[in-house]
Amino acid sequence: MQGYILLSHGSKVKESNDASKNVLKELKKSLKNVELAFLELSEPDFQSAVKSLKESGVSQIKVLPLFLAPGKHVREDVPHLCETFGKKYEIEITVLEHIGSNDGYVKLIKDILEQK
C-alpha cells in the first residue's frame, strides 16, 4: 500500500506551519495515507510521519519536499532522512523532485500573474 509524506521546512511562526497543515487537510479529503512532516522547528517530525504510515500498513512511501529550490535540505538532508528511516522501519521511501522543479508549479505562478 502506498503512503505519502509532504515534507515542509517548519517554522517558529505558527501561521507558516498552519499553511502546510491546511494543505494536508485538503489532500486528506481525496488521498489516503498522507502525512505532513516538518524538517525542523515544528512537529510532527519526519520519523513520526514514517512511523505513523508504517503502523497503518503502508509498504512504500513517496516524499514530496515542499521546497522551491534544490538547496542543502533537498540535496542532502531529505535523502539522508529517507535512507535512515527507511532502514529503521524497513520500508521503501522514495524522494520525489521538490515542488519548485515541477512544471505545474511554474504554470501555477503564470496563471496567478495573468489573473485580472
Image (cartoon, helix red, strand yellow):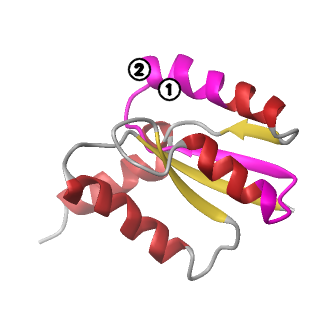
The residue that label 1 is drawn on is 74
Disc 1, SS: helix
Q: Residue at x 88, y 38 (%)?
A: 90
**Cα distance between the residues tagged 1 and 2:** 5 Å
Q: Is residue 12 above or below residue 49?
A: above
Front in this rendered view, residue 30 or 93: 93
Tell me the quadrant of the picture where the N terminus can be found. Answer: bottom right
In the image, residue 104 lies in the stretch drawn in magenta: no
Between 53 and 1, which is closer to the camera in this rendering?
53
For the record, the magenta segment spans: 54-81
| Residue 77 falls within the magenta-colored stretch | yes
Residue 57 in percent (x, y) is at: 86, 63
Amino acid carrying label 2: it is Gly
Q: Label 1: how many residues lie within 10 Å, few (<14), some (14-19) or many (20+)?
A: some
Residue visible at 22% across and 43% down?
A: 12
Res 96 quadrant in image: top right
The amino acid at mark 1 is Val
Q: Quadrant of residue 8?
A: top left
Mark 2 highlights which residue? 71
Callout 1–callout 2 Cβ contact below 8 Å = yes
Location of the C terminus by quadrant is bottom left
Q: Position of residue 62 (x, y in %)?
A: 70, 47
Q: Which mark is residue 98?
A: none
Q: x%, y% of residue 100?
A: 42, 39
58 displayed left or right of 73:
right
The single residue placed furthest to the left in the displayed view is 116
The residue that appears at 37% across and 46% down in the rendered structure is: 42
In terms of secondary structure, where does tag 2 sit?
loop
Does residue 74 sit above or below 26 in this rendering? above
x and y, in percent, of residue 76 in the image: 55, 17
The quadrant holding residue 21 is bottom left
Q: Is residue 82 left or right of residue 98?
A: right
